[in-house]
Image (cartoon, grey):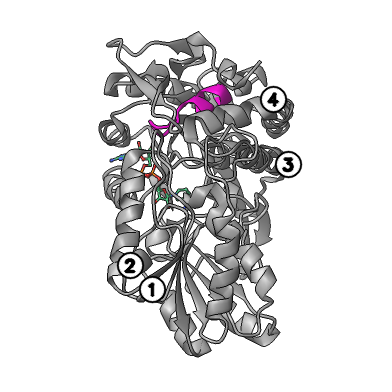
Amino acid sequence: MSGLDLVGPEQRGLFIGGAWRDAQGGEDFAVLDPADGSVLTRVADASVEDALDALDAAAAAQAEWARTAPRTRGEILRSAFELIAERADDFAELMSLEMGKTIAEAKGEVTYGNEFFRWFSEEAVRIHGRWMQAPAGGSRLLTMKKPVGPCLFVTPWNFPLAMGTRKIGPAIAAGCTMVVKPAELTPLTMLALAGVLTEAGLPAGVLNVIPSTRAADISKALMADDRLRKVSFTGSTPVGKVLVRQSADNLQRVSMELGGNAPFLVFEDADLDAAVEGAMVAKMRNMGEACTAANRFLVHADVAEEFAKRLSERMGALTVGRGQTEGVDVGPLIEEKAVESVHQLVTDAVHDGATVVTGGTAPDGPGFFYNPTVLLGVHPESEINTHEIFGPVAPITTFATEEEAIERANATEYGLSSYVYTRDLARTIRLAESLDYGMVGVNTGLVSNPAAPFGGVKSSGFGREGGFEGIEEYLDTTYVAIPAD
Ligand code: NAD
């Protein structure tokens, strides 16, 4: 078996009510290989009618699924975890093919993404309420948790597995049914996942997957239907805002995992080797195409040149190429537009006074590649510092004091992840308390962990995925009053 075999010919369709089928109008769309732009395969293109069929299936399955024993729900997740672990190499190859990331990165995502299934298989049996006496006596106050009901999940292309399992895992554990609309650029991994969950015993209708090029129409139609009770979205901030507005009419619960503009702070007392190591992870994970990617390097003026030199040596030594080729460190970006936008940001930064220490160019085609780049002396207000780069470019600006570093780090509408490198414990605590971010990495370039609450503040959204908090997004609380004296 190899990656593409995980998605057999019939599985390149829509998965609705436990069955694979074509789109009603017979439409399909091409999934491209970003390493050369060729067509990998075609998948069915769901219409609004197909999406409503998927919601019918989810709504029909909801009551019985909510009554299913927590242990049963947990064990389905656990079986899926085992099946994915057995097929980790195939999942990694499939993701690498449709998304471009290297096999090593894709294996990392399989481990990370699959861990949400293991974590939530364990959380399924720990859903509970409380019992207390009213302060004035008399009543007993009980609380219980119930699944919120049918959900819509919309996911991005950058982590085709993990961005799905972070939502599907807790929803299954909580007893919710769901309609999943994967990113049109990378629908194959989600279709493979639907196959695995079916094999693991997930009942028909609990999970429905509808690849589509009509994301806006579908979300609008599904959210206009009051049977849908929850929307969880991972993607860009502008689309997140549209979905929050759309949720108003039926007051659906919403979780929003949106864009980031992560600062990476290096203080004069930092272990510079460790900071460079962390910078490589925070910047180059997923070719920089991560919402958690270090977007702005803020480095104390005393160490900035040395940091830039060491980082450029590491960045300049990376091998760019097709993700499935042995020895390649950096795969292609997702599409041509991404290369153009990254290059534009670099060009503008240079125009505003930055120096290119390494990179700054796109290699000759085919494929959507960009060379790992380090820029020094970037103006704080250059576009590259105010926009998500989503590519392998590290812009460095300098600061003189801790106050200035904090002020600059917070001078953005976003608030997802942030990173700090310092050996001073008191400073670490001051930073953790003053940075307006949902996540702070201290002397590490990696914050993601299925057991921790992942999420942002401000324009990076709200809600948390993973940790004890992750399942709460899928549970409502019912309070029961019982007079007892
Ligand atoms: P995107 O917003 O363009 O697309 C995300 C998904 O939304 C896709 O499935 C797309 O088809 C769908 N979509 C587009 N318009 C829609 C609409 N009107 N209604 C409903 N769905 C719609 O984002 P992208 O380019 O796929 O992903 C990159 C973005 O995702 C970046 O901003 C990145 O920071 C963010 N992201 C955030 C997290 C996080 O956890 N905070 C994780 C990964 C990616």
Indicate whether residue 318 is drawn in magenta. no
* Along the viewing direction, whichever of 356 and 158 lies nearer the viewer: 356
Which residue is identified by label 1?
378
Q: Do the residues labelled 1 and 2 touch (CB within 8 Å)?
A: yes
Which amino acid is tagged 2? Ala
In the picture, the quarter occupied by the N terminus is: top right
Number of dots carrying numbers? 4
Spot occupied by residue 176 in the image (x, y as percentages of width and height): 53, 34
The mark closer to the camera, 3 or 2, is 2
In the picture, the quarter occupied by the C terminus is: bottom right
Which amino acid is tagged 1? Val
Which residue is identified by label 4?
87
Q: Is mark 3 on a helix, strand or loop?
A: helix
Spot occupied by residue 464 in the image (x, y as percentages of width and height): 53, 54
The image quarter containing residue 311 is: bottom right
Label 4 crowd (10 A; few <14 / some 14-19 / many >=20): some
Which amino acid is tagged 4? Arg
Label 2 crowd (10 A; few <14 / some 14-19 / many >=20): many
